[in-house]
Image: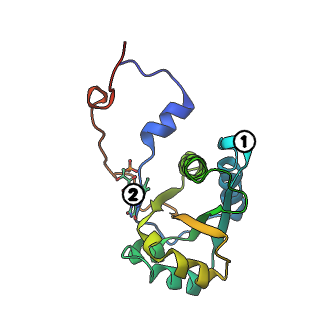
Amino acid sequence: MQIPDSPILKAIYERRSIRQFTDESVSRDLIMTAIEAASWAPSGLNNQPWRFAIIWDKPLQEALAALTKYSNILKSAFVLIAVFLDKEASYDYTKDCQAVGACLQNLLLSLHSMGLGAVWIGEILRNKDRVNETLILPNRFELMATVAVGQPAHRNQKSHRKPIEELILLEK
Ligand SMILES: Cc1cc2nc3c(=O)[nH]c(=O)nc-3n(C[C@H](O)[C@H](O)[C@H](O)COP(=O)(O)O)c2cc1C
């Protein structure tokens, strides 16, 4: 299949989950740019139920790292972005989770497009209440994911996808 020359398609195909980072810093401006782009995701009724906690503080990062088996990834990151669903902004739980998923994908693609590495950490959700306690955030905010961000230590991460013939249920 011929892939059209599109920067969005390029980012979608090139982005990989990055789990190792260098010690090099990440500018706050880039993180804010990515979060703003994330906030342009679609949402039902345009309710924008996503909320972000940005964690630069190393001791706080280590406290969060202790809540997942992927602690090495979190500790290696320069900054963590915890993404929450604001239950008070919610109108339909399933649709709101879908909207936060779209927001997370925007976040990952934006970070990638600016040369940063990132990975979506879902495993930490088993301790989501403890994440709120650690960040001193009320239960109104439900953790959806934590994104570990840094300068990528490498770009040779490989991935694969099922052939689309296996995914298309019908075409009439
Ligand atoms: C809902 C969700 C949860 C994920 N949780 C984790 C996780 O806890 N740890 C991790 O290393 N990667 C996690 N990932 C990243 C996936 O492993 C990764 O996206 C998948 O293997 C495809 O690789 P790619 O992102 O490089 O294309 C998660 C991704 C999603 C969408």
> Pointer 2: what residue?
154
Asked if residue 163 lies left or right of residue 59, the reply is: left
| Mark 2 Cα-neighbour bin, 10 Å: few <14, some 14–19, many ≥20 | few
Residue 145 vertical placement versus 5 (above, below): below
**Which residue: 47% across, 70% down?**
125
- Closer to us: 47 or 91: 91
Q: Position of residue 155 (x, y in %)?
A: 39, 52
In depth, the one of 165 and 60 nearer the eye is: 165
In percent of width and height, residue 65 lies at 46, 79
Q: Are marks 2 and 1 in contact (CB under 8 Å)?
A: no
Q: CA distance from mark 2 to mark 1?
A: 40 Å
Which one is closest to the eye, mark 2 or mark 1?
1
Using the image, determine if residue 171 lies above or below residue 53: above
Name the residue tied to disc 1: 45
116 left or right of 53 in image: left
Q: Which residue occupies 68% across, 77% down?
A: 138
Q: Position of residue 46 (x, y in %)?
A: 73, 43
Image spot of residue 67 (x, y percent): 45, 80
Residue type (three-letter) at the residue carrying disc 2: His
Crowding at label 1, few (<14), some or many (≥20) Cα neighbours within 10 Å?
Answer: few
> Vertical placement of 85 versus 155: above or below?
below
In the rendered view of the protein, which quadrant contains the N terminus? top left
Among the 4 quarters of the image, the one containing residue 32:
bottom right
Quadrant in which ligand 1 is drawn = bottom left
- Tell me the tag on residue 36: none
